């Protein structure tokens, strides 16, 4: 978990903790918040509060045996599932459901977390349904999802929704300035990195500098008609980021140039849609010649604006 307070997460955790103090918790929750905005932080904080022996209005106390076990990743009544590759598979869910039938080892609740629950394949989702309907006494399931709209309706309808009000760009800028002393507006790349927490990590690791370099390289390439050397022979992960940056560059062009010829505007919008389609393809089929693909994007753009 991040050490810096996350106001939009802390507010929701406080509301949830207040419900716990009055024994008003449900048995299944859907936390539809991207990890880049703190979805995993909120989910784990809720799990900790549920397991805590002396929960406070701000979540787990941090000092009881349950909290210490949880922070050491060793609580016997906590179960976490992540995707095996690109999917959460049926065997993973069946194993979890079997474990949840056992008696609590610490005498309190049993808590299961499914990270990126939108990755449940059909068989896994169906295997989870009965447990969602009848999880057993003192058992709580927390389903975190970056894209909750992709969850089967039969899954999401059986969960209480945890609603989080996302921060505005100015609130994110203030948050970053407080934690990292960032003075300039860096929120332009939020769609690429996934959210403010991911952006903060990018700044810490220096990846943000690389994203800036991609933006500059695309601007030069679109202007000159020649693919910049900085965009050639990128590995899979960097190529995906670079393609996302190109989409943002073209989108920004459409926003800034209000007097752009309507036909050119439409063709640039079509090119942007093609770039996003190829972006998703690259996520699924990484073995693509991105240098050739990027060169084609440049050629297509030149054909539009000439």
Image (cartoon, rainbow, N blue to C red):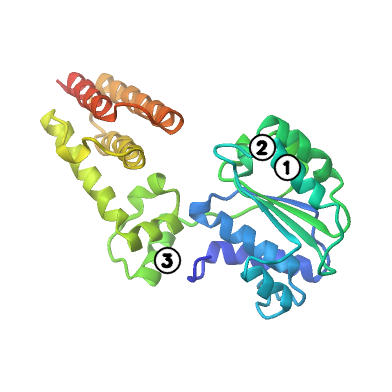
For label 1, the SS is: helix
| Mark 1 crowdedness (10 Å alpha carbons): few <14, some 14-19, many ≥20 | many
Disc 2 from disc 1: Cα separation: 7 Å
Q: How many marks?
A: 3
Disc 2 from disc 3: Cα separation: 37 Å
Q: Are the residues tagged 2 and 1 within 8 Å (C-beta)?
A: yes
Q: Nearer the viewer, residue 303 or 253?
A: 303
The tag earlier along the polypeptide, 2 or 3, is: 2
Disc 3 from disc 1: Cα separation: 37 Å
Residue denoted by label 1: 93
Nearer mark to the viewer, of 2 and 3: 2
| Mark 2 crowdedness (10 Å alpha carbons): few <14, some 14-19, many ≥20 | many
Residue denoted by label 2: 89
Q: Is residue 298 visible?
A: yes
In the image, 206: left or right of 66?
Answer: left
Looking at the picture, does residue 208 appear above or below residue 293? below
Where in the figure is residue 13, as x and y percent of width and height?
65, 65
User: Which residue is found at the position 25% from the left and 29% from the top?
Assistant: 294
Nearer mark to the viewer, of 3 and 1: 1
Residue denoted by label 3: 175
For label 2, the SS is: loop
For label 3, the SS is: helix
**Outermost residue, left direction?**
224
Looking at the picture, does residue 103 appear above or below residue 221? below
Name the quadrant of the C terminus: top left
**Outermost residue, bottom direction?**
63
Q: Nearer the viewer, residue 170 or 240?
A: 240
Looking at the picture, does residue 81 appear above or below residue 106? above
In the image, 48: left or right of 246?
Answer: right
Q: Are the residues tagged 3 and 1 within 8 Å (C-beta)?
A: no
């Amino acid at each position: 978990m991040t050490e810096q307070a996350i106001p939009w997460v802390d507010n929701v955790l406080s509301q949830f903790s207040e419900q716990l103090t009055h024994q008003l918790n449900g048995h299944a929750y859907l936390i539809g918040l991207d990890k880049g905005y703190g979805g995993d932080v909120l989910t784990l904080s809720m799990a900790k509060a549920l397991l805590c022996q002396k929960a406070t209005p701000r979540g787990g106390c941090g000092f009881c045996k349950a909290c210490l076990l949880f922070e050491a990743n060793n609580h016997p009544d906590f179960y976490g599932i992540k995707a095996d590759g690109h999917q959460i598979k049926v065997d993973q869910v069946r194993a979890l459901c079997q474990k949840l039938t056992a008696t609590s080892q610490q005498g309190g609740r049993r808590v299961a977390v499914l990270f990126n629950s939108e990755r449940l394949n059909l068989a896994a989702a169906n295997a989870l349904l009965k447990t969602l309907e009848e999880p057993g006494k003192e058992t709580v399931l927390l389903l975190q999802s970056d894209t909750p709209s992709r969850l089967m309706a039969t899954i999401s309808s059986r969960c209480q929704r945890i609603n989080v009000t996302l921060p505005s760009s100015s609130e994110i800028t203030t948050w970053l300035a407080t934690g990292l002393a960032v003075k300039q507006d860096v929120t332009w790349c939020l769609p690429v990195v996934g959210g403010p927490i991911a952006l903060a990590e990018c700044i810490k690791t220096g990846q943000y500098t690389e994203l800036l370099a991609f933006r500059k390289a695309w601007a030069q390439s679109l202007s000159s008609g020649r693919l910049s050397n900085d965009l050639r022979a990128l590995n899979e992960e960097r190529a995906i980021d670079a393609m996302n940056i190109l989409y943002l560059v073209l989108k920004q062009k459409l926003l800034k140039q209000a007097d752009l010829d309507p036909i050119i505007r439409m063709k640039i919008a079509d090119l942007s849609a093609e770039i996003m389609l190829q972006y998703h393809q690259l996520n699924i089929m990484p073995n693509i010649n991105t240098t050739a693909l990027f060169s084609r994007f440049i050629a297509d753009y030149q054909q539009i604006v000439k």
